[in-house]
Image (cartoon, helix red, strand yellow):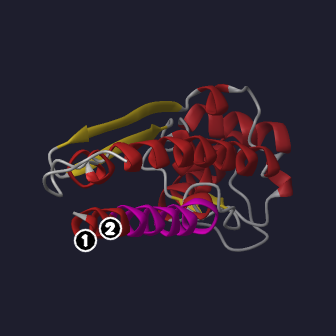
């Protein structure tokens, strides 16, 4: 046992001022968070090109006066893929929509906007143009990407990592406080 002159000078209680142990705990949980994100992405079937999995970047915990910071960064693509729905402000070009209508066939659509059901414009080209324009405006007005919530963005942190991180940090703080009390009362 080393002899101490005060709590601040005690090497065992040094953790209270420089957060070294908190940084170690954060680094451990940062790696666990990255693995949880990658596992969720693979379970959701979003690992098409590997670009999303390769976009993860860890920054080791840095200590400063009164706080510890650690970062796990990933491409914004993960957040976009996790959305329940998306509205695109831009729609496909009208020529692409016309090509689609021509490929499917204007007769396969229920109606042509601006005409009563069952009646079509005089020319096929006019029908294709009006149907393509209607599709384009429909995409602009309502979400065109809808899907169920996958939980790849927030759930790994909220359910798999943060509760245990907070528990381990509380345990480490309690251990440090008990060491400081012990050092204070043994002198």
Q: Which mark is residue 131?
A: none
Image-based side of 32 in relation to 66, left or right:
right
Asked if one can make out residue 143 in the rendered structure from this viewpoint, the answer is no
Q: Is residue 2 left or right of residue 111?
A: left
Residue highlighted by disc 1 = 185
| Place of residue 105 in the rendered image (x, y in percent of width and height, measured from the top left) | 84, 45
Q: Disc number at residue 182?
A: 2
Using the image as rendered, state which of residue 91 and residue 116 is in the foreground: 91
Residue 21 versus residue 86 in the image, above or below: above
- SS at mark 1? helix
Query: Local crowd at mark 1 within 10 Å, few (<14), some, or many (≥20)?
Result: few
**Front-lying residue, 137 or 142:** 142
Residue 182 lies, with reference to residue 51, above or below; the image says below
Label 2 Cα neighbours within 10 Å, binned few <14 / some 14-19 / many ≥20: some
The region drawn magenta spans: 158-176
Relative to 137, residue 174 above or below: below
141 or 42: nearer the viewer: 42
Q: Quarter of the image for the C terminus: give it.
A: bottom left
Residue 64 x, y percent position in the rendering: 19, 41
Label 1 – label 2 distance at C-alpha: 5 Å
Q: Residue at x 49, y 57 (%)?
A: 87
C-beta proximity under 8 Å, tags 1 and 2: yes
Does the stretch in magenta take in 56?
no
State the SS at label 2. helix
Query: Looking at the picture, how far across and down is residue 110, in whole percent?
Result: 79, 66
Taking depth in this image into account, of 120 and 154 the one nearest to the observer is 154
| Residue 26 visible in the shown view | yes
The residue lying at 71 percent from left, 27 percent from top is: 50
Is 51 positioned to the left or the right of 124 in the image? left
Q: Horizontal placement of 68 versus 50: left or right? A: left
Residue depicted at x 54% and y 69% = 163
């Amino acid at each position: 046992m080393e002899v101490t002159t005060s709590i601040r000078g005690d090497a065992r209680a040094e953790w209270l001022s420089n957060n070294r142990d908190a940084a170690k705990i954060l680094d451990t949980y940062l790696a666990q968070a990255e693995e949880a994100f990658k596992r969720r992405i693979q379970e959701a079937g979003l690992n098409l090109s590997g670009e999303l999995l390769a976009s993860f970047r860890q920054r080791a915990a840095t200590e400063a006066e009164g706080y510890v910071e650690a970062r796990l960064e990933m491409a914004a693509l993960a957040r976009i893929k996790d959305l329940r729905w998306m509205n695109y402000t831009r729609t496909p070009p009208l020529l692409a929509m016309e090509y689609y209508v021509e490929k499917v066939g204007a007769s396969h659509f229920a109606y042509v906007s601006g005409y009563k059901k069952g009646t079509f414009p005089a020319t096929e080209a006019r029908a294709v143009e009006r149907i393509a324009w209607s599709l384009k405006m429909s995409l602009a007005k309502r979400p065109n990407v809808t899907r169920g919530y996958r939980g790849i963005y927030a759930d790994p942190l909220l359910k798999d990592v943060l509760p245990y991180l907070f528990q381990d940090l509380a345990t480490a703080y309690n251990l440090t406080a008990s060491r400081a009390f012990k050092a204070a009362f043994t002198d």
